[in-house]
Structures are given as C-alpha cells and as structure tokens.
Image (spheres, rainbow, N blue to C red):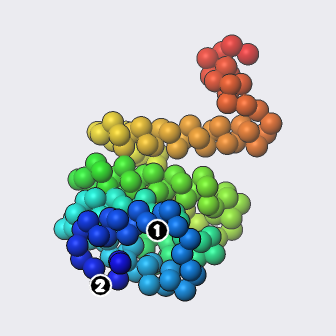
Amino acid sequence: CLVGCTDPQVRIMAYRALRSMNTAEQSWANVIPQFGADFNNYEHANVHVCAAALRAFNVLPPDQLEAALRKVGPAIKPCATCSSSIIRTAAVEMCGLMLLEHISPAAAAASSERELFADLWTIILESIFDENPYVCLASAEIVRRTFVKALASRGGSPSSYSEALVGNE
C-alpha cells in the first residue's frame, strides 16, 4: 500500500498495519524508502503521515534497523525540530523506542553509526525543553524509563529509585 500510493489516509493506515503485523523480510526493501520519503517530506506532507511513519519505524527487524538508519536517519533531526508538535512528539517517541527497546548501549557504542545514536539522545534531551507539553512529556518519559531500566539492571526497583529521589531511603 505504501509504494506508489499518495493518499494520506491510506499511507497512515498502511503504517498502522505495519505496526501490528509480521512483514516478510523481502518486503522491507520496498518499505524503507517510504519511511525516508515521509520523513524528508515533513514540511509539505500531511503531518499525520509523517508521524505515522516515525511511529512505525521501530517495527523494522533488528538486523535491518542500522542499515535503514543510515538511509533515513539524517531526516529524523529535522523532524524533531520542525514546527509541527505532532511530528516532534512522534520523532522523540521513535528515538526513545529505538534506543530503549531495540539497540543496546553497547551495540550503539560499537556501531559505525554511533554518532547518529548520540544524535538520537541529543534529540530526546533537547526536547525536554520544548514549548509543547506533549513533546516535553514524551521526552521526560523516555528519560524516566532510561533511569528505571538502568536501576533494574543493577538490581534496584522503580520504587527504590523514587525513594532515592525524594530522600526516603
């Protein structure tokens, strides 16, 4: 549905479908350029199409994620700083999901794309100060989940993290 289709509603539904189904590996070669087209066209396209593409990007198989990032990654930062809060929120959520769920810190550090991964963290951290509360909330939630995940990897619990923050330990 994505290849050759320009109808915004069809593209949005196709991205939503991608998020909920298993896609054959050979099909990703056709889908990845569509992500790039919708990321790069954020200023002129339907904002909801760009947001749907950003939210669906994380369904790529892990073995294809880094190659896809090489192709479309440079378009993520402009999406995170564009005038649409819908697109900025989706870009921050995509960065967070990718870094928290799909790419371990060790893999990111060893990757040839480590500068791009560092840029994704920069996007998240700079978005804490965004003028739109939804963008701020998305960014703050990613930072919170990062701390909780780090604490859990050291044997702590979210409640002990909260207690440490407020000094109840």
Where residue 24 appears, as percent x and y from the top left, is 56, 80
Residue at x-position 23% and y-position 73%: 7
- State which quarter of the image contains the N terminus: bottom left
- Assess disc 1: are there few (<14), some (14-19) or many (≥20) residues with their C-alpha within 10 Å of its C-alpha: some
| Distance between the alpha carbons at the discs numbered 2 and 1 | 16 Å
Confirm whether residue 59 shows in the render: yes
The one of 21 and 144 positioned closer to us in this rendering: 21
The residue at 54%/75% (across/down) is 23
Indicate whether 80 appears above or below 27. above
Q: Position of residue 100 (x, y in %)?
A: 60, 52
Q: Check disc 2 and report the residue beneath it.
A: 4
Question: Which x, y percent locates residue 121?
Answer: 51, 53
Q: Are marks 2 and 1 in contact (CB under 8 Å)?
A: no
Looking at numbered disc 1 in the image, what kind of residue is underneath it? Leu
The residue at the point 52 percent across, 67 percent down is 21
Q: Residues within 10 Å of mark 2 (few under 14, many from 20)?
A: few
Horizontally, residue 94 falls left or right of residue 147, namely left
What residue occupies the far top of the structure in this picture?
A: 168
Mark 2 / mark 1, whichever is N-terminal: 2
> Which residue has dot 1 on it?
18
* Image quarter (top left, top right, bottom left or bottom right) of the C terminus: top right
Mark 2 residue type: Gly
Q: Is residue 24 left or right of residue 149?
A: left
The residue nearer to you, when weighing 126 against 169, is: 169
Helix, strand or loop status at disc 2: loop
Which quarter of the figure has residue 11?
Answer: bottom left
